[in-house]
Image (cartoon, coloured by chain):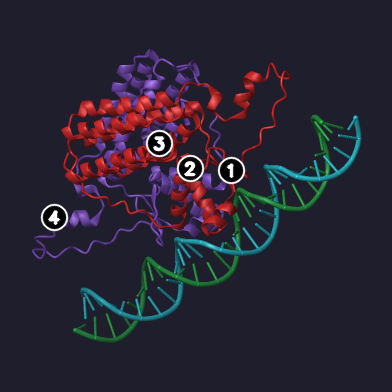
Chain colours: A red, B purple, C green, D cyan
Amino acid sequence: MAGRADSSKTAEPSDKVSVICRALRRAIIEQALEPGAKLPEDSLGERFGVSRTIARHALGQLAAEGLVELRRNRIAVVATPSWQEARDAFDIRIELERLVVRQLAGKLTKPQIAELTAHVDAEDRARDGTDAVSIRLATEFHILLAHMTNSPILVRYVSEVAYRCCLTLSLYSRPHSSECAINEHRAIIAALVKGDVDKVMGLMHSHLDSVATRALVAPSPQRGRDLLDILAPYADEASSEKVVKLPKAVRGR
Amino acid sequence: MAGRADSSKTAEPSDKVSVICRALRRAIIEQALEPGAKLPEDSLGERFGVSRTIARHALGQLAAEGLVELRRNRIAVVATPSWQEARDAFDIRIELERLVVRQLAGKLTKPQIAELTAHVDAEDRARDGTDAVSIRLATEFHILLAHMTNSPILVRYVSEVAYRCCLTLSLYSRPHSSECAINEHRAIIAALVKGDVDKVMGLMHSHLDSVATRALVAPSPQRGRDLLDILAPYADEASSEKVVKLPKAVRGR
DNA sequence: GCGGCTCAAACTGCATGCAATTCGGGCGGT
DNA sequence: ACCGCCCGAATTGCATGCAGTTTGAGCCGC
């Protein structure tokens, strides 16, 4: 298990499409774009000063990551994962991140430790900001960990699945209580430094599991937004009260 | 843990780009296109009867999956994973597939069992065919398993990482001996049917691990193809013998 | 008022065109 | 022979244009 060839070499490409991808990703995970929001190619192109071709390409990439849904001849929308998909994403995430900490335990360098604690401090500071930001920071903590493995593949998968989880949090989560998460992050760092592989894997597991179960409260579709699902229970007793003409709430454009 | 909403609903999109993606993926994992092979946009477009735009988009998708490498202003090439990346891919794959069999153990339906055994029989029959085909079939066995979880996300990740592993096999593997792998597949099916979670997870783990270690023989760069790495050890004692003018060996048409 | 129909506007799917960059072979110097 | 340089061909990056599909707002009959 020789050490790896160092380095945060992952130079982010400055492709126009990559730029748009990053911007959209961030907008999505900060819930500036809610699940279901429309993403017309021209609007995006206009907004970012590029042609439709590029916007389209970016949407393709994000669709590959599962953040947007792309149906033929239809306007692209921010993905709306089902509850089951959310649960699956978390299951996968748990395994992947256990792998991350397994590789990392006891191998962190001084500057890496500093970077991690700095990040958690930032999370702490952002606690009175919006939920969206603290969720993003919490997610980025995990991605930061993944980066430190120096395994591009692991980074990619952890990032993707973490973003997806982030997305579902905005769908199914009750008001986020981030404090405990932050403490758990600190505990993970401590265990990593100490090099206790089993402990840190357990910590990571329970951390993610608790986030998942706290967030994905149940298959209760109440907070979901698939109208059909929401309305299903009312289908029988329809007529008692007129269904309010819900105002569409389109966020796209 | 209620059962899931059935069904192989994953209708493959008939988008032109998806078609091209599938074709290229298959060509790559069957080693019709070796790592490093060039993939010019117009050639692809011409070959598949579409415009460059579409070919380009397809390449973008495959790059997102890690099967091709895309550098700005440069011709796209089939990816050439480093040995370390290959090892990482296998590590991730092991975790993901353990998850698959964990979810599947004892829950297979009759037709699913039939499908799996049929597939392994096909593997058996293909044993005297080319290595490429048997490797592809072996990979598809794992993807078939993933499909049976009815978790689109899991399917996506297992597929991707399996394809990547497939790609690296063609780079670093010694002549593939597929027989034992086939028997291991049968053993996995048996354990799944029996519903022995721990056993099947162990089987899957050792199966993949043995494939990995048998294939990824060592960090010996001999069979690798990164010239710089190969030549590194000789850099010091340069001059003793003139460096042979290696003939470039570009395979991309 | 309510549900269905129609049609124009909006949008996507895709090909093509143009500018910028890279690639590769020939040429001259050593 | 060997190396570096140069220039045309090959190739990518991106915008635009056209055709086909979806959308949704208005209109009509009830």
**Is the residue at mark 1 from the same chain as the one at mark 3?**
yes
Q: Kindly report the distance in space between the C-alpha atoms of the residues bearing marks 4 and 3.
A: 39 Å
Which amino acid type corresponds to the residue marked 1 in the rendered image? Answer: Arg
Of discs 4 and 3, which sits in the foreground? Answer: 3
* Circle on res. A28: 2
Q: Residue A136: image x %, image y %?
A: 40, 40
Cα distance, mark 2 to mark 3? 14 Å
The x, y position of residue A180, in whole percent, is 33, 28
Mark 1 secondary-structure assignment: loop
Task: Return the residue at label 4.
Answer: B233
Q: Badge 1 is on which residue? A: A251
Q: Amino acid at mark 4?
A: Pro
**Of callouts 1 and 3, the N-terminal one:** 3
Secondary structure at badge 2 equals helix
In three-dimensional space, the C-alpha distance between marks 2 and 4, rounded to whole angstroms, equals 48 Å
Residue B105 in percent (x, y) is at 39, 18
Name which residue type carries label 3: Val
Callouts 1 and 2 in the same chain: yes
Chain letter of the residue carrying label 4? B
What residue would you read off at disc 3?
A: A161
At 28% from the left and 35% from the top, the residue drawn is: A100
Q: Residue at x 72, y 18 (%)?
A: A240
Q: Residues within 10 Å of mark 1 (few under 14, many from 20)?
A: few
